[in-house]
Structure formats: C-alpha cells, structure tokens
Amino acid sequence: MKRGSTIRLDRIDLKILATLQGAGRISNLELAETVGLSATPCLQRVRRLEAAGYIRGYEAQLDIDRVCSNMVVFTEITLRNHRREDFLRFERAIQAIPQVLNCFLVTGGYDYLAQFIARDILDYQTVIEDLLDRDLGVEKYFSYVTIRQVKRARGYPLSDLVSQDP
C-alpha cells in the first residue's frame, strides 16, 4: 500500500490509533490485548495504518518546563497582501523557524495564528524581529504571552470526531 493512501477505518483501527497516541511505546502484545486481537493481525493492522499515513511517527512527550525555562507566545499575524504567492511565501518561511511550534491559517480578523516557544521575552522579540526582517509581507502582529498551560492534549478525541456506521 502506498504511503498516504486512504483505507476505511473500522472500530478496531480507531481503537489501535487511540491507544497508540496515548501509549506509543506499548508492546504489540499489550496493544493486541487492549484492542481484542491476537498479536499477528494487530501488527498487520498497525503496519497498514503506518503505510497509509495515519500514523506519522512515535515521539516522546517531553516536560519542557523540567528541561528548561521557557515561555509560550501565541501570535496573530496579518499579511499585507492576500495573493496566493504571499501566503505560500510566508508558509514556506515559517516552516524554517524552529521556535514556531504550530501555525494555522485562520478565518476572521487576522490570517495566521502561530504558537512560539522562547527562552524569555527578549528571545521571543529576537525571533519575531528576525521574522519581520525577512520581509514576508507581515502587516501587523499581536502577541499573547501565556501564563501557564492548564490543559495538555495527549491526542485527538477520536471517538468524538469519527462517526462509525452501525
């Protein structure tokens, strides 16, 4: 099966995905027991889900606050012009900035919502000034410094998002 192909997900596939996103290091045997399969068919399903692109990878979830002092800033970004090439140029450039954790094209009063991580406010200021110096067509930006994170997602609520035919 070619990477990125689409397969029809059944309830067992969804259970595998939900389990893996919360416990990526689970053994295949434990996973099989959790989803109600024997080990070989479970492993075959996992490999099929990986090959189809439903599983992008397995990563450790770091407690960044224990690793280093940091701050998270959400930034609303509005572009001066709204031609396709302006959006593409901005999006290509934002990919190369490691301090941008997430960036979304949005509707409403601004164009992008970006999530930055920095050592401190001076570090964030340097990052945003470097972004502006690239002349990517940013007309204005507004920054929201977070105080503390009150919820951290451990994955997507698959059972709420995916409807299953009876």
Image (cartoon, rainbow, N blue to C red):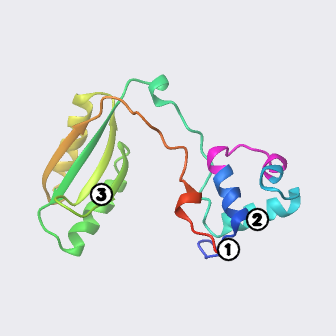
At horizontal 59% and vertical 72% (from top left) the residue drawn is 4
Which badge, 3 or 2, is on the more N-terminal residue? 2
Q: x and y percent of residue 155 in the render?
A: 55, 49
Taking the image as shown, residue 166 lies to the left or right of residue 85, namely: right
In front here: 156 or 50? 156
Residue that numbered label 2 is attached to? 45
Taking the image as shown, residue 26 lies to the left or right of residue 63, namely: right
Q: x and y percent of residue 53 in the render?
A: 60, 66
Q: Quadrant of the N terminus?
A: bottom right
Mark 1 residue type: Pro
Mark 2 residue type: Arg
Q: Does dot 2 land on a helix, a strand or a loop? A: helix
At horizontal 53% and vertical 53% (from top left) the residue drawn is 156
At horizontal 28% and vertical 43% (from top left) the residue drawn is 74
Q: Which residues are magenta?
A: 20-31
Mark 3 residue type: Ala
In front here: 135 or 105? 105
Residues at marks 1 and 2, CA–CA distance in whole angstroms: 21 Å
Residue that numbered label 1 is attached to? 166
